[in-house]
Amino acid sequence: MLGPTLFSLFINDVSDIFNDLLVSLSSFADYVKLYTFYKLGVPHSDLQVAVDRLTNWARLWQLQIAVSECSTFRIAYPQWKIAKDIVNTSYSIDRSIIPFTDCVRDLGVYHDCRLKYYQPISIIVHNAYKRAVLILKSFHSRDPQILKRTYCVYVRSSLEFSCQIWSPHYKYLIDKIESAQTYFTKSCRIVSVVV
């Protein structure tokens, strides 16, 4: 199991190429995130310079960047005053424009550009419904204990994953999350009565 350790040592110097820029780097395994903040009246070309340096570093060490998996994500509230040149700025890797997205998945957690988590919660609930339906279709047994265990392992765990980050405080979002469990328990009850 030396592979991950050797890979970490191999890419360990990547953070050194951004020392003179107002750009921060976060990395996890083979994922790298570059981020910065903008202030009015301050030059803001550092992020594109950092992307160019990362591209050159990867080319030097014969690593390939998956451009199709890259995206740009901007956190801003509508009431914030943002300079037009910042809004119109686009970033590129080897002349390929990196697309902007309003919702991004980062280490399994979805984030939206306003950090309100409406869209991420919708995605999580949709995936929970799909898993619940799949369980009900796949299992022949209607033993409540088996279904409860299966629900906790496959559905509830996905609903609770990183809930400390996106924990909702609006009632309609809480009801939306709880609707997956309500659907599953009602479906189990209906199937048990019919059988």
Image (tube, grey):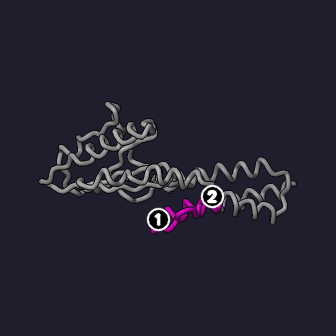
| The N terminus lies in quadrant | bottom right
Describe the element under mark 1 as helix, strand or loop: helix
Instruction: Answer above or below: position of 149 versus 33.
Output: below
Q: Quadrant of the C terminus?
A: bottom right
In which quarter of the view is residue 63 placed?
A: top left
Q: CA distance from mark 1 to mark 2?
A: 20 Å
The residue under label 2 is: 180
| Element marked by disc 2 | helix
Q: Is residue 174 left or right of residue 24?
A: right
* Residue type, mark 1 in image: Ile
Q: Considering only order in the chain, which callout, 2 or 1, is on the residue closer to the N terminus?
A: 1
Residue 172, horizontal then vertical, whole percent = 49, 63
**Which residues fall within the magenta stretch?**
156-180
Instruction: Indicate the amino acid at tag 2.
Output: Ala
Name which quarter of the figure residue 80 lies in.
bottom left
The answer to whether one can see residue 76 in this image is yes
Check disc 1 and report the residue beneath it: 165
Q: Is residue 11 magenta?
A: no
Residue 22 is labelled as none
Tally of numbered tags: 2
**Which residue is at a point 40% across and 56% down the rendered structure image?**
26
Q: Position of residue 137 (x, y in %)?
A: 77, 47
Q: Position of residue 184 (x, y in %)?
A: 70, 58
| Residue placed most toward the observer, 111 or 55 | 55
